[in-house]
Amino acid sequence: MKRAGWYLIAGAAAGFAGVLGFHSAGTAAPALPGRPNPAAAGAPSAAGSAPAAAPGGPARHATGAVVSYGYGQLSVAVTVRGGQIVAASVPVLHTVDPYSQQLAEQIIPQLRSEVLAGRSAQIHAVSGATFTSEAYAQSIQSALDKLHVK
């Protein structure tokens, strides 16, 4: 019976340490209202994630509407060639708190990869980031509507 108290204290301490580690793992500064967030812009990384050339004519660009969601606002810019999405970035990302910023910076590259792999705005929501995923999809669809692409 005496050991149960120690297990409870040790478990609580381990859980607290895990939460602190998760929240302090990101080093990115939160987005400031009225300013785009360059860290989440989706620019190609040094790992070679530059968009592949798709046949079908000149590239066309559009930026989707700024979509408000439960934890901030975002907008997605797309490049389309031959009716297919060949690049996507997030020029506008405003979040309500540092945790939401960190989550968005982790999720947006996954959403971008899914869009580029499927070459469309049809994406699956990322578990734990449903609102961000839905806002991303809405903004991409808005950009595609401006370009008259399905």
Image (tube, grey):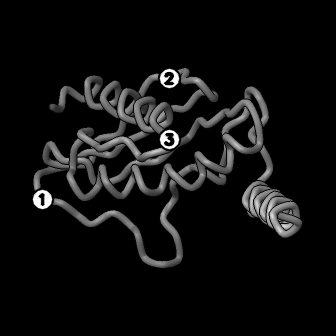
Residue 149 point in image, percent of width and height: 18, 32
Categorize mark 2 by other alpha carbons within 10 Å: few (<14), some (14-19), many (20+). Answer: many
As drawn, is 135 to the left or to the right of 104? left
- 3 or 1: mark nearer the eye: 3
- 2 or 1: tag closer to the N-terminus: 1
Residue 32 point in image, percent of width and height: 79, 35
As drawn, is 107 to the left or to the right of 10? left
Q: Residue, x 58% and y 46% (percent of image)? A: 104
Look at label 1 and name its amino acid.
Pro
The residue carrying mark 3 is: 129
- SS at circle 1: loop
Q: Residue, x 40% and y 29% (percent of image)? A: 139
> Residue 97's quadrant in the figure?
top right
In front of the other: 40 or 44: 40
Categorize mark 3 by other alpha carbons within 10 Å: few (<14), some (14-19), many (20+). Answer: some
Q: Residue, x 52% and y 70% (percent of image)? A: 45
- 3 or 2: tag closer to the N-terminus: 2
Look at label 3 and name its amino acid.
Ala
For residue 67, the mark is: 2
In front of the other: 148 or 60: 148
- Is the residue under label 1 in contact with that under label 2 (CB below 8 Å)? no
Look at label 2 and name its amino acid.
Val
| Res 24 visible | no
The residue carrying mark 1 is: 55
- SS at circle 2: strand
Residue 48 point in image, percent of width and height: 43, 76
Estimate the spatial distance between the alpha carbons at disc 2 and disc 1, rounded to whole Å: 31 Å
